[in-house]
């Protein structure tokens, strides 16, 4: 497989992975509906930079360290899982906090900078994402790729991750989804918290399974 074809295949695989439901999707959707479009876009930006980080360590071959050093991989899974549980608990505790349309758009909860860091930390908290990136790169990228691949792949990965979650943010921050959310905020937040928390607990309780 020539480098250009390999890069196209890698980007297609990463797009499919990004579109798969997971904690990143839940967080972007929840911030877009519950806070503001700007918060959703900031969260999407954080996801994009998280993707750049994972592509960088995959290009450097560092994912093999996670695959080879069992205790490090287990530790990262536990830490990532506990972080997701923490995020879930915050969403659950805030479920009963009432919002109006104006408050959702400009209230005290609106903080794009904070939303960016939540997006970035959520993306980085899942070591399985690092393994997914590493596996895709190892399977599809030539053993000795040309130098231009190292400069082209990170921005393309950013475009894939941030682009997809921007679509999610814009879609979920539109008026109709926001109105539906405000009517059922308690249950929507609790379902989102349950989904994120379940993913976090799954990481913790399967940490001993180190097979890639």
Image (spheres, rainbow, N blue to C red):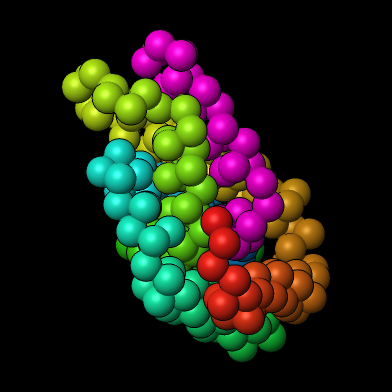
Q: Is residue 165 visible?
A: yes
136 relative to 123, above or below? above
- Magenta span main SS: helix
Query: Where's the C terminus, which quadrant?
Result: bottom right
Q: Is residue 80 visible?
A: no
Give the image quarter of residue 108: bottom left
Q: Is residue 3 magenta?
A: yes
Q: Position of residue 29 (x, y in %)?
A: 62, 56
Residue in the picture at 69% in, 85% down: 96
- Which residue is more in the foreground, 16 or 44? 16
- Total tally of numbered discs in the picture: 0
Q: In the rendering, at what x and y percent does residue 13 appear?
A: 56, 32
Residue extent of the magenta highlight:
1-29
Position of residue 85 in the picture relative to residue 119 (left or right): right
Residue 76: percent from left, percent from top: 42, 72
Q: What residue is at 48 percent from the left and 43 percent from the top?
A: 135
What residue appears at the point 47 percent right and 28 percent down from the top-left corner?
140
Could you tell me residue 83's position as x and y percent?
Answer: 48, 78
Residue under the image location 59 percent in, 85 percent down: 89
Give the answer, above or below, for where 6 lies relative to 116.
above
Task: Give 205 or 104, whichever is nearer the viewer.
Answer: 205
Q: Quadrant of residue 187?
A: bottom right
């Amino acid at each position: 497989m020539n480098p250009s074809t390999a890069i196209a295949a890698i980007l297609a695989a990463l797009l499919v992975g990004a579109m798969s439901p997971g904690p990143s999707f839940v967080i972007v959707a929840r911030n877009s509906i519950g806070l503001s479009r700007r918060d959703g876009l900031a969260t999407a930006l954080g996801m994009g930079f998280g993707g750049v980080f994972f592509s960088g360590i995959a290009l450097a071959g560092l994912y093999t360290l996670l695959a080879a050093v069992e205790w490090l991989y287990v530790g990262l899974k536990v830490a990532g899982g506990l972080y997701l549980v923490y995020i879930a608990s915050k969403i659950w505790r805030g479920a009963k906090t009432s919002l109006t349309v104006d408050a959702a758009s400009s209230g005290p909860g609106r903080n794009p900078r904070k939303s960016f860091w939540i997006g970035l930390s959520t993306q980085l908290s899942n070591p399985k994402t690092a393994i997914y990136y590493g596996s895709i790169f190892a399977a599809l990228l030539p053993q000795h790729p040309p130098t231009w691949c190292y400069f082209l792949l990170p921005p393309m990965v950013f475009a894939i991750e941030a682009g997809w979650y921007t679509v999610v943010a814009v879609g979920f921050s539109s008026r109709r989804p926001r109105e539906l959310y405000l009517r059922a905020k308690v249950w929507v937040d609790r379902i989102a918290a349950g989904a994120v928390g379940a993913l976090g607990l799954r990481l913790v309780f399967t940490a001993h399974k180190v097979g890639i």
